[in-house]
Image (cartoon, rainbow, N blue to C red):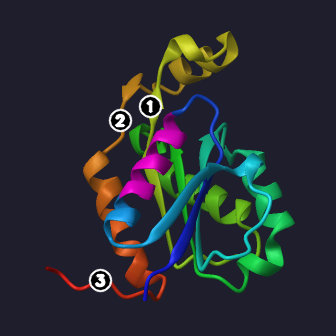
Amino acid sequence: MSARILVAYATRNGSTAEIAQSIGRELTNTGHAVDVTEIKTVSTLTGYTAIVIGGPLYMGSIDGTVGKFVGNYREQLLKLPVAAFGVGLAPKNPDPGAVEAAMAALRKSLGPVTPVSSILFAGKLDPAKVNFVMRKFLEMAKIPAGDFRDWGAIAAWARELPVKMGFSLPPKD
C-alpha cells in the first residue's frame, strides 16, 4: 500500500531543512507520495497517512514550533503513524549524557504523541551564523564547528520508516 507522507520540519539556519528534504527523497524512492514543508506553513493534515516531524535542538530544547504543531494537530497525530527526528550537536558533545538529554527534549516536544521511530542526527554548526552569546556557550562546552550530518545514516533511517509506519514496500523490479 502506498502512503501519502508529510515531512514537516522546523529550521533556523537550514540544516534541518536539508535533512528533511533528504528524508523526503528517500521516502519518495520507496514508492510513496511525499510532501516536505516547513511546519509553520502546514494548514492541514487531511489526506496524509503518516507524518514525519523534525526540528533543531538549541540550548537543550527542540525548536518551539514543533510543540505548537503537535498541539495544533494533536488529535490527528494521535491517529496516524508519526516518526520524529531532532537535529543538534549533542552527538558531538563530550558529555556522555548529551544524547539522552537531547532525545528527552525531542520526546517532550512531541507531548502525547509516541513516534514509531525517533532519532537524533548530528547537525551543522557555522559559528558565523550564531550570535556572540551562543558562540561563547559553544566554546565553553567544547562543541566543534563543522558539518557533522551523516547522510548515509539519514537515508537509512528514512528507508526504514514505511515499514515501521505499517506500509509495505513496493515490489522490486
Residue 13: tell me if it is visible.
Answer: yes
On screen, residue 26 versus residue 109, left or right, reads left
Q: Where is residue 36 in the image (x, y as percent from the top left)?
A: 55, 53
Query: Rounded to the nearest whole Å, what is the CA distance between mark 3 and mark 2?
Result: 32 Å
Q: Which residue lies furthest to the left in this view?
A: 173
Residues marked 3 and 1 touching at CB (< 8 Å):
no
If you read the primary sequence from the N terminus, does the residue marked by circle 1 or circle 2 appear first? 1
Residues packed near mark 1 inside 10 Å, few (<14), some (14 to 19) or many (20 plus): some
On screen, residue 147 versus residue 17, left or right, reads left
Q: Is mark 2 on a helix, strand or loop?
A: loop
In the image, what residue type sits under mark 2?
Phe
Residues packed near mark 2 inside 10 Å, few (<14), some (14 to 19) or many (20 plus): some
Residues packed near mark 3 inside 10 Å, few (<14), some (14 to 19) or many (20 plus): few
Q: Where is residue 155 in the image (x, y as percent from the top left)?
A: 31, 57
Is residue 88 positioned above or below 79 on the image?
A: above
Q: Where is residue 147 in the image (x, y as percent from the top left)?
A: 37, 29
Residues marked 1 and 2 touching at CB (< 8 Å):
yes
- Disc sitting over residue 124 in the figure: 1
